[in-house]
Amino acid sequence: MFDPALRNPVAYATALRYNGEAYQWGAAVRGLCVCALWAVLAWFPPDSLPRASAQLLPVTLGAITTWAHYRPGVLDRVAGSRSAALRWLGRHLSGAKGRATVDLSGVLECGGILAALLLYVGPVAVRPLPVPVYVFGLAVSTVHVWTAMSQVMIDAGWYNPDAPPARQLVRLRPLIPPALSALGFALFAWPLYVEGKDAPMGVLGASLLAASFLLLWPYTFIVEALIRSAVTTCHVEVLAVGRDDAITLHSVVKNGVRAVMRQVAADPGAGAETRAWVNELALLVEEARMILLGLPEQPCSVSTLVGRIQKLMPHDQQQTVTLDVTQHLSGTDYGLVRRVLPDLITNAWTAGAQHVGVNVQLEETSTRPWVALRVEDDGPGLPSGAVADPHGSLRVLESHLRRYEGRIEHHPGPVTGTCACVRWKSVPD
């Protein structure tokens, strides 16, 4: 009842399914209670019947409205009625579903049962009434209040992450059982301290009926324990299914894509676009596998991207890539890094590099910052004509960066190898 962590989609969906069944039974029980209250009017004094009927009318309308609330077909017909008032009622009840809020059916039932209860207790109670009628009326009214308030306490709207309840309602929720218990005792034991007479039920009977409302606390805790168990079970099952799918994806798809990567890398006739698409496919497979394992990356995590690129490399070369990045990148900048970096790292290790260093930083200027990406390797260097080849992967990447005023430059490494420098104007979120 006091755990905000339950306000999540799985808990909300579980509560909706539980409540859909529980509310229908609750509405049926309260409907029977209302019928029973009407039936005992046969033992009321004749002169009290008009007033008694008037006091039972609100709770009767509430029971009918609640019944319509949980009958989708009936609610749809009400919403499509020719009467403007009925159309408003249909829209109002539909809009209140799945939300912890005050609606007309709740007001009619709660206010109506209090009016009905005042036929038996309080300053305007009907007198005289046979003791069995008095006790029966209080018991039936208590059952009605208990089922109505249990519905309030476990309403799915408490767990709705998209339309959370008002803060005041959240604070009020745990106070409902003791408030009802105090009010119940005040009404049930009214003759003891006002009229100076013994209550027909006695102090013990009045206390037991009033204290029964405190059972709403353990009832709510039990329901929330079931919801919490359902959330945990769902999470565990999703992870189990994800692991199984990740194993299948690794065995059937990823190994096959890596074999294609090696074949394409060894084929001098493979074009730059072919190599880029194979690299992209391999990266997508690895990203899907990691997500299935329940390890989604942060939106702009270059370190996670490098880790996934390493997963595509031969096992003996996976530790050859080091990363130096401190700045957070925007979504667009990260997308460009994701497009450029796999090809640069793949080009380095396929060329025979034993170590690849990656550095990403933002270069502040007076206007808009630039993103600078450096990839240094200790390989044999670029083959002759690789940079000038108009159909090579380097030129394909550079053409993609031009829309951001970007470019790729290659320089010989300090001793051996190549340093690829990629720069473009940063694109803010």
Image (cartoon, grey):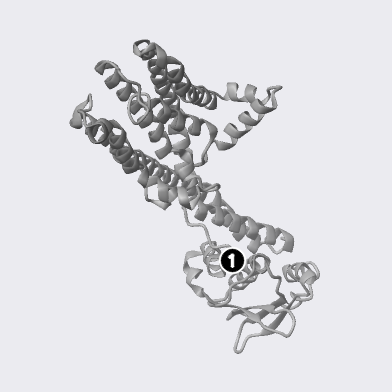
Question: The C terminus is located in which quarter?
Answer: bottom right
Q: Whole-percent x and y of residue 382?
A: 68, 78
Left or right, residue 95 beside residue 272: left
The quarter of the picture where residue 386 lies is: bottom right
Q: Residue lying farthest bottom?
A: 414
Q: Which residue is drawn at 59% across and 21% down?
A: 74
Q: Is residue 119 left or right of residue 193?
A: right
Q: Mark 1 points at which residue?
A: 300
Horizontal side of residue 426 vs 223, given as left or right: right
Up-down relation of residue 256 to residue 391 (above or below): above
The vertical placement of 387 against 134, above or below, is below
Of residues 102 and 16, the one drawn nearer to the viewer in this rendering: 102
Q: Closest to the observer: 364 or 207?
A: 207
Q: Residues within 10 Å of mark 1 (few under 14, many from 20)?
A: some
Q: What element carries label 1?
A: loop
Q: Does the rendering let one see residue 271?
A: no
Q: In front here: 23 or 347?
A: 23
The residue at the point 46 percent across, 44 percent down is 158
Q: Is residue 6 above or below residue 410?
A: above
Which x, y percent locates residue 128?
Answer: 30, 18
Q: In this rendering, does residue 195 appear at all?
A: yes
